[in-house]
Image (cartoon, rainbow, N blue to C red):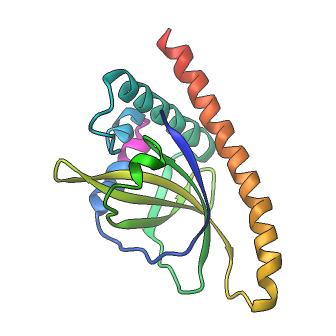
Amino acid sequence: MVKPILLVILITTAIFSQTGLKDNFVKYFNAKNFGGIAGLYRYPENQDTASHNQDSLIIAAFYAELYNRWGKITKANAFTMCDSCILMSVTLSTADSSFWNHQEIGDTLIYKLTTSKKDSVLIGFRMRKQDKKMKIGYFDIHTIVKKNLTEKDRVNFRQECVIAAKKLQTEFNEMINRAMIKNGAQSK
């Protein structure tokens, strides 16, 4: 079952490779081939067929919802992290954290998108190897929260993070619920 995972603060250095993945993602997204995007994900090897199909359909419905919100991707450029960049992220993955905790982490790719409905969206892919190919382990939607925090600002920042995290998690859960409802309606 698809599990949304909230990462309150992610401080990371991105490694920009795997541009083929980004190109395929953009191509599939703009063509509304959301099943193609679901095929870019890594799934547990021991996942039964019914669970795999359900995860794939939910992921596809999730991206259909994103397409409705964002429209077509018109630009996708690598986002260069700086030492003081702090990102708040909402994450979509297959399986759950007990599975992913034992998996090798590959590259982290972060892109700044321009879409037909939004000026700027930060997305990320955290890659995992499966069958000698890099697959999406996690898909992240990022928000830059603050830069260059002083010691005095840290307490306020933590409080702001909790509020923003709850808001992001609520919105993300609503998107997943709509995707599940749509998936249920389509499978009947």
From the viewer's side, name the closer residue of 24 and 161.
161
Residue 51 falls in image quadrant: top left
Q: Is residue 143 magenta?
A: no
Please determine whether, in this image, residue 85 is positioned above or below residue 112.
below
- The percent coordinates of residue 171 (x first, y second) are 70, 45
Q: Please provide the residue range marked out in magenta.
A: 27-32
Q: Residue at 34% across / 67% down in the picture?
A: 107
- The percent coordinates of residue 145 (x first, y second) are 69, 72
- The percent coordinates of residue 30 (x first, y second) are 44, 43
- The percent coordinates of residue 126 (x first, y second) are 40, 60
Please determine whether, in this image, residue 183 is positioned above or below residue 43.
above
From the viewer's side, name the closer residue of 71 and 5.
5
Q: Residue at 53% across / 41% down in the picture?
A: 3
Q: Residue at 74% across / 66% down in the picture?
A: 161
Hey, which residue is sitting farthest top in the picture? 188
- Residue 26 visible here: no
